[in-house]
Image (cartoon, rainbow, N blue to C red):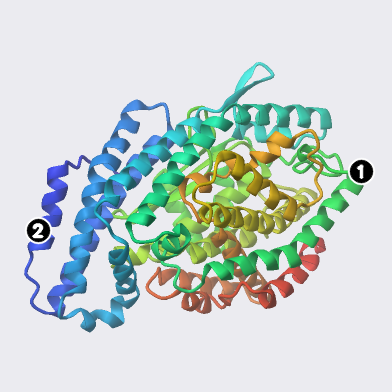
Amino acid sequence: MQNESRVFTVEETKNLFEKLEQREISNAQDLRKWILDWSKLSSILAEESARRYVAMTCDTTNKPAAEAYEFFVSNIDPVISEKNEKLQKKLIEHKNLNDLEPEFGNWFKAVRTDLELFREENIPLETQLNLEIQKYQKITGAMSVEYKGETKTMQQMVPYLQVPNREEREEAWRLLTKRRLQDADALDSAFDKLFSLRIQIAKNSGYENYIDYIFKAKHRFDYTPEDCKNFHESIEKIILPLQREILQQRAKKMKLPKLRPWDLSCDPQGRAALKPFKTGTELVSKCGNLFSRLNPQWNEWYKILQKENLIDADSRLGKAPGGYQITFYDSNVPFIFMNAAGTNQDVYTLLHESGHAFHQFAMAKQELFAFRDIPSEFGEVASMSMELLGAEDLSDFYNEEDFRRSRIEALQDIISLFPWVAIIDAFQHELYKFPKHTAKDRKEIWLSLQNRFDSGVDWSGLEDARAYLWQKQLHLFEVPFYYVEYGIAELGALQIYANAKKNKDLAVQDLIKAESLGSSKPLPELFKTAGIKFDFSPKTMEPLAEMFNTFLYSP
């Protein structure tokens, strides 16, 4: 991995900010230079935070790594938050601010919002939040099961949910579920602590309603909570029937009256699960071959990831669950973290995270650090488009028959994603409208949404598992209200895929051009530059849903 983590003391960090705070700024040229120096310091500190996060998540049992991350979160982050607020005030109050509006206007709007929300009393609460998230990660990172005489991580058990033998799948599913339910109370408690901290932060900022606060904090200037509610309803009306039909066809192929939860990941014709690779090294190498054929620019960027050892692919005990892409901003290189276990889904995960990484490379020339912090609604377009475009050529992984299986599975997963997005997002809206809810209330709210978006799977006798299914979704714990973006972005990605069917080179060219803008432009403009619409209403969703019939059954 390129470069090593460096040491930042509290005093050094304060001094670096205070030099900026005390600098005399006489004119617009000086103001621009000052902004970029502040941006440089921000990128250095962001990289340090990222490196410590990577070290901690790659090995949650590494005590020094955990302590280094905790030190940064507890001691450096509060300084950054406090000092940034002072610099933001200095910026907004400067007489030459309007001179730089054409270049930095989109950022200025975000800065004004951040200043409106900032409260000094929230700094220790944000620190506490980060530490509580780390405790949650320790709970999930420690989850493992004993299966066939071996200790397996939860991710390493996924392939057993895909085997043809139904009894074996059920055994694996029940073992996984039993292990998760062992920590149900602990996860409920972890959520309660995080929830109460977030409610208090919103109140401190003058908001009784956390939803209004978080929409401001996330700089959601281009859509509203009501738009999200309408999006849920559109998914219920347009996508849910398609998901139900797909599952009904699956049940027929499996000759089952109803599907059970362990019947959803296997091949419906009883074929063995796809095994596209054996090791993370093999996965990384084969994806490299894919990108070499897909696009010259993506190939060049991926080679950097490989050369600099910027992909940690394998699942192992003690490694935090999930996958992410994080950026070492000062070095201007992305890092990919995932938990590969030899499954078809792992291929798409690496494609997804590579899409994020390429986005970071595309906007690396943006001078302003803030413009390299992209809105998720478009950031996920980059990653989801990569899944769709990359999946057109999986010859290094599969023969023709297995390729068709993989492609259909992936497209069906997209259909399944939309109702899950609606459930997770609606769940959060309901919870945060009800700040004094109990764990029992939370369970009832979740079950009501499960019933509303019921896809026809038989959960009889598995009521506890269904009631706590939400605990599998780390976003609810770590990044509240970060999930609807996946649905919005998937609509964008499907539009790019449709464009690529007509002219792949132009579609990719438009996507990279939009990615290069970072967050220097509003969301609707980013979408427009990519050749797609920023719209998640039925008029956009319906033709894309209809297109699925062609995509699902074409060669």
Q: Please state the horizontal and vertical placement of residue 148, each as a whole percent of the image.
A: 69, 19
- Mark 1 vs mark 2: give the one in front: 1
Of 201 and 61, which appears nearest the observer? 201
Residue 331's x, y, as percent? 30, 53
Q: Residue furthest front?
A: 436
Labelled disc at residue 170:
none
Q: How many marks?
A: 2
- Residue beneath disc 1: 257
Q: Residue furthest top?
A: 149
The amino acid type of the residue labelled 2 equals Lys
Q: Residue at x 27, y 81 (%)?
A: 101
Measuring from the top left, give residue 545's x and y in whole percent: 74, 68
Considering only vertical position in the picture, is 222 above or below 325? Answer: below
The answer to whether residue 375 is above or below residue 472 is below
Q: Residue at x 19, y 42 (%)?
A: 8
Answer left or right for 59 relative to 541: left
Q: Which of the image's four quarters has the C terminus? A: bottom right
Judge the density around disc 1: few (<14), some (14-19), many (≥20) Cα neighbours within 10 Å: few
Picture quadrant of residue 273: top right
Decide which of 61, 331 is in the foreground and name it: 61
Q: Residues within 10 Å of mark 2 (few under 14, many from 20)?
A: few
Query: SS at mark 1?
Result: loop
Pointer 2 residue: 19
